[in-house]
């Protein structure tokens, strides 16, 4: 029987046949052709990249780009009908599976295995090409196994493509242990780091440094679970606690290799600290910080719609303001003088004036770069979040308060509105939170058009923080933990150095939550630290409601429940999600996780 492969690239290939009745569909190409032609082999691996979920982009107009961050309690989506609001709050994750968090990409893993096996048999392609492209496919496979391990613990490791005549014993595969999965991923990344080029032949492709940077992340996760978790299901889940240091050492070693020998540096192109931090996620001209990312190009047919959904109302785009940020996220950002960003919440009763020059202007520059707050300047204009204004009317000298009416301008002002846009403060009950996510919003994206902005998946700052965290638990064996944290990450952010006594577990964790905010890290970090129950389960998040005192230029701020009375549910069992009734029914050798 002739074997064929489907290449889903939106391209049409015509394959001639000697027999006019031996017709080949135009989207099917014989294996014997694909793996003897460099263009087709490249098309195959490009399709593997495109189908791999390096970051979440599902949902109409890509509205699930906020889903993982919503689960971590950083921000949510605007409306309850969107999964990043409705499926995250008041939703039990039970025996039916992990819902939108689910990730079981064995179809893609099979295609990776097909690619590796058949490319290796090529008689036409040179050995170096075969080794490099196979290593890229292994990078993709390692990524996918890591993503499954984060959700489910141990999963079946499959490295061969089973044929259509495979027996039931071959098809029904038992779960490997969580330790075996992490060790497999680590060993794969080690192996391909010695094969992949140091500089990719195409942006968005895996390199030696991407493999090592990913290993620093993967081994840090393994170490955390060993240190903070415990073994279950006869060792199927968890690690011996004694394994933690070994994984921390592997994480440190991989991170150090990237930092010392890789061609990367923290992005510092703009002397203005805030603008530099904004540009970090928008500058695509050989950005020195990005180790691995996803390339987008609207004109080439690959784009996302984050600007369409995320741009503040009043600045174009018919759908907008979709990622409201919580008060708890703002509180993570300390002040540049070292004072805590978490103030006495008694101030947030709507009766105390807050000076924006201090409350916003002296807060960590990363807050000012990555979050829209009252009167943030965007596209040359302020973004307003206040729901009303207290002012003295020059006509009669009386103190008055505006309503939420649209279009009212404070008398005697230079166009200051009585209230900001409804979607920023009061539309839909309490859907807005009075703050919006700014990180990744590109002001140059044309109104209504999908975005071409690339997405950094692994960047140097994360690798540095991986190193710092691992070094902390190993008692700083190289003596450079404070230097990397202070003189690299915090210095670039315009934040003061921490003393040795200040570099604590809590402070290192806070630094990750600030530096890596909105990048799909916080939720998974809370889980690997095993504090997600404490931080998320039945814990309310809060919104901020702003009233402008026009006479003083200050604000009253009121704290209110941020999710229409809803809460996240993250019981202990959810550190490992259910594989789900369907998968258990399909494969009798699969064992379900505890508690389901």
Image (tube, grey):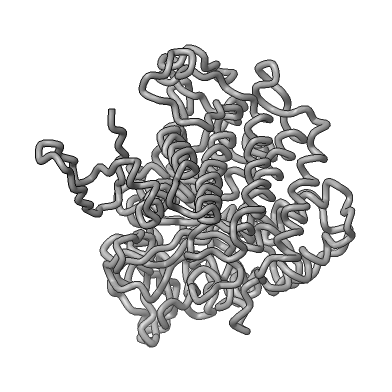
Q: Quadrant location of residue 425?
A: bottom left
In the rendered image, residue 199, in percent from the top left (x then y), is placed at 58, 66
- Placement of 558 over or under 581, stated as above or below: below
In the rendered image, residue 19, in percent from the top left (x then y), is placed at 13, 39
Q: Is residue 33 left or right of residue 523?
A: left
Q: Residue at x 17, y 43 (%)?
A: 17
Q: Residue at x 31, y 65 (%)?
A: 300
The answer to whether residue 398 shows anywhere in this view is: no
Q: Residue at x 45, y 65 (%)?
A: 454
Q: From the viewer's side, name the closer residue of 295 and 498.
A: 295
In the rendered image, residue 406, in percent from the top left (x then y), is placed at 28, 69
| Numbered disc total | 0
Indicate the quadrant containing the N terminus: top left, top right, bottom left or bottom right.
top left
Q: Quadrant location of residue 444?
A: bottom left
In the rendered image, residue 281, in percent from the top left (x then y), is placed at 51, 68
Q: Is residue 195 left or right of residue 59?
A: right
The answer to whether residue 409 shows anywhere in this view is: yes
């Amino acid at each position: 029987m002739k074997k064929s492969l489907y290449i889903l690239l939106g391209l049409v290939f015509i394959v001639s046949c000697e027999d006019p009745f031996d017709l080949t569909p135009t989207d099917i190409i014989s294996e014997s052709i694909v793996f003897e032609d460099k263009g087709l082999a490249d098309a195959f691996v490009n399709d593997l990249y495109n189908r791999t979920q390096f970051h979440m982009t599902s949902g109409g107009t890509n509205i699930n780009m906020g889903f993982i961050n919503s689960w971590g309690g950083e921000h949510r989506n605007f409306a309850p009908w969107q999964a990043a609001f409705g499926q995250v709050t008041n939703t039990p994750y039970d025996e039916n599976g992990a819902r939108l968090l689910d990730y079981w990409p064995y179809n893609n893993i099979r295609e990776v295995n097909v690619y590796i096996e058949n490319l290796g048999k090529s008689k036409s392609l040179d050995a170096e090409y075969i080794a490099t492209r196979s290593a890229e496919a292994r990078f993709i496979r390692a990524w996918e196994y890591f993503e499954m391990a984060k959700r489910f613990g141990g999963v079946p490791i499959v490295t061969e493509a089973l044929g259509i005549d495979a027996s039931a014993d071959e098809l029904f595969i038992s779960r490997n242990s969580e330790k075996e999965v992490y060790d497999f991923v680590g060993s794969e990344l080690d192996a391909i780091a010695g094969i992949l080029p140091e500089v990719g032949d195409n942006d968005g492709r895996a390199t030696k440094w991407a493999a090592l940077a990913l290993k620093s992340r993967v081994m840090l996760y393994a170490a955390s679970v060993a240190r903070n978790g415990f073994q279950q299901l006869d060792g199927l889940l968890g690690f011996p606690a004694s394994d933690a240091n070994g994984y921390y050492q592997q994480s440190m070693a991989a991170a150090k290799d990237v930092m010392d020998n890789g061609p990367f540096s923290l992005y510092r192109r703009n002397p203005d600290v805030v603008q530099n931090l904004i540009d970090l996620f928008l500058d695509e001209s050989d950005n020195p910080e990005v180790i691995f990312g996803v390339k987008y190009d609207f004109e080439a047919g690959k784009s996302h719609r984050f600007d369409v959904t995320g741009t503040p109302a009043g600045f174009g785009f018919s759908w907008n303001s979709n990622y409201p940020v919580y008060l708890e996220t703002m509180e993570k950002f300390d002040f540049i003088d070292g004072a805590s960003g978490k103030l006495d919440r008694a101030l947030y009763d709507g009766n105390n004036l807050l000076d924006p020059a201090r409350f916003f202007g002296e807060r960590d520059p990363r807050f000012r770069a990555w979050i829209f707050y009252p009167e943030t300047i965007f596209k040359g204009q302020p973004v307003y979040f206040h729901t009303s204004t207290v002012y003295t009317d020059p006509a009669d000298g009386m103190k008055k308060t505006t309503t939420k009416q649209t279009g009212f301008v404070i008398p005697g002002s230079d166009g200051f509105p009585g209230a900001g846009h409804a979607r920023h403060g009061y539309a839909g009950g309490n859907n807005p939170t009075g703050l919006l996510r700014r990180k990744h919003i590109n002001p140059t994206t044309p109104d209504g058009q999908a975005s071409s902005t690339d997405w950094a998946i692994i960047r140097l700052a994360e690798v540095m923080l991986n190193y710092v965290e691992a070094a902390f638990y190993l008692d700083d064996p190289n003596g450079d933990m404070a230097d990397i944290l202070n003189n690299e990450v915090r210095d670039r952010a315009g934040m003061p150095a921490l003393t040795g006594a200040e570099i604590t577990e809590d402070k290192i964790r806070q630094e990750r939550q600030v530096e890596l905010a909105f990048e799909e890290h916080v939720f998974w970090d809370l889980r690997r630290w095993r504090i997600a129950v404490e931080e998320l389960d039945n814990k309310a998040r809060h919104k901020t409601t702003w009233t402008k005192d026009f006479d003083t230029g200050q604000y009253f701020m009121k704290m209110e429940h941020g999710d229409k009375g809803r809460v996240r549910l993250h019981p202990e069992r959810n550190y490992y999600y259910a594989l789900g009734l369907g998968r258990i029914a399909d494969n009798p050798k699969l064992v379900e996780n505890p508690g389901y």
